[in-house]
Image (cartoon, grey):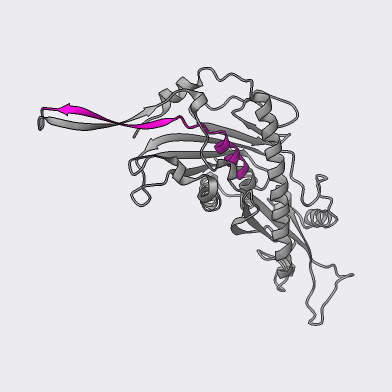
Amino acid sequence: MAISASEAHYIIESCLTDLRIDGRSKLEHRPYTITNRSTHTKTSQSATAPAFILSNGSSRIHLPGSTTDVVCSVKADLVHPSPSKPNQGILELNVDLSLCGGGGTLEASAGGGGAQKRRRQQREEESQITSLLQRLILPHAVNHESLVVWPGKYVWRLSIDVMVLRCDGCVLDASSIAIREALQNTKLPKVQAVMEKGNDDANNGGSASKNDLLVDGDHHKAVSPCGAEDCPLVITVSVLSSPPSATDAVTSTTGSKRYKSIAIIDARTEEEACASTRVCVTVDTNGMVCGVHTLGGGGAGMEEEGEQGGAGGSSMPISMLGEVVTTASMAAKSLYTKLDRDRQVVKDVSSTDNDCGYGYLLKNHFLIQ
């Protein structure tokens, strides 16, 4: 997203005063609305939210005004395990930006170009987001060993599809929330391995064993994947740096200029365009860091100063490292508290709901491959 130098100056100065352009503080998330299969919206008001028919779990993350809208679906299948990991389930992830139009994704749009160039950029962004989520989220999303149905023969394969309809910044953060909510709402039917003895007179006149799987279609016996409640979240910390002006520039003994910097979370597209760098930190429910990745920033209005070795480009002051870690930790703790509190409220409200017919849906759509 291209913004002018005056707009960048206004946005950065607003963040430095801890009063951002939308009225939030530096550690405040936007008021996301989280919708899942529990048929209620995670706000003070309930709303209808049917699950996807062929999904075992689903969720939707959106903001009032439709500036951000992310949908996640989880489909479960019984498959043969990987030869290299016979005692672990399989998790697959795919991200679709085809309906997003390229706005609010990882990198600012370069602007211009034909339809073919935009499609190529979209594919590159999809690949980058998918790769990052696979490395930052999937290894810690669920207990992979709990997805084993028959060791060495059958395991659950969870196919996670994330569709970004609209995104006003921090696409990784919104996607991680959608994945976590969808996994926690995923229901896997009870499956038992059955081994029976049968006759095989045509071949050797003796008896042969027959292996089969028994799927229980009762929805009330279905369970969520073990460890889904501990699925980590991605917190993107954006570092905004303001170069000193000509009138009040502060110089050190070496003559180098000092930049005023601040770390914020859940940045909008305009704020991402002003960031000198962005650090994606994956934090679990215990406050442990599971992964870190650095993204380039827009750095609007910083080009001239960047040539002098300042905070321009994809860099940040070394003194900001401690603040970035502290900011990510505090933001993750606050977000986990809110999500768990809202989930408990929804669970209490939906405890009287009737899930008639869903057990038969599970029974009819689980396939053994």
Residue at image coords 66%, 57%:
278
Question: Whole-percent x and y of residue 207?
Answer: 16, 31
Nearer to the camera, 121 or 194: 194
Whether residue 67 is visible here, answered yes or no, is: no
Question: Whole-percent x and y of residue 269?
Answer: 70, 48
Nearer to the camera, 22 or 299: 22
- Figure check: 349 above or below 123: above
Splitting the image into 4 quarters, where does residue 40 fall?
Answer: top right
Residue at image coords 51%, 46%:
116
Relative side of 152 to 139, left or right: left
Q: Name the image quarter holding the C terminus.
A: top left
Question: Whole-percent x and y of residue 83?
Answer: 33, 49
Question: Whole-percent x and y of residue 308?
Answer: 72, 74
Residue 257 magenta-highlighted: no
- Figure check: 1 above or below 204: below
Whether residue 230 is visible here, answered yes or no, is: yes
Residue at image coords 38%, 50%:
85
Nearer to the camera, 18 or 83: 83
Looking at the rendered structure, the number of numbered marks drawn on it comes to 0
Nearer to the camera, 264 or 344: 344
Q: Residue furthest right?
A: 247
Q: Which residues are magenta?
A: 176-201
Splitting the image into 4 quarters, where does residue 277 fall?
Answer: bottom right
Splitting the image into 4 quarters, where does residue 247 fall?
Answer: bottom right
- Figure check: 75 above or below 127: above
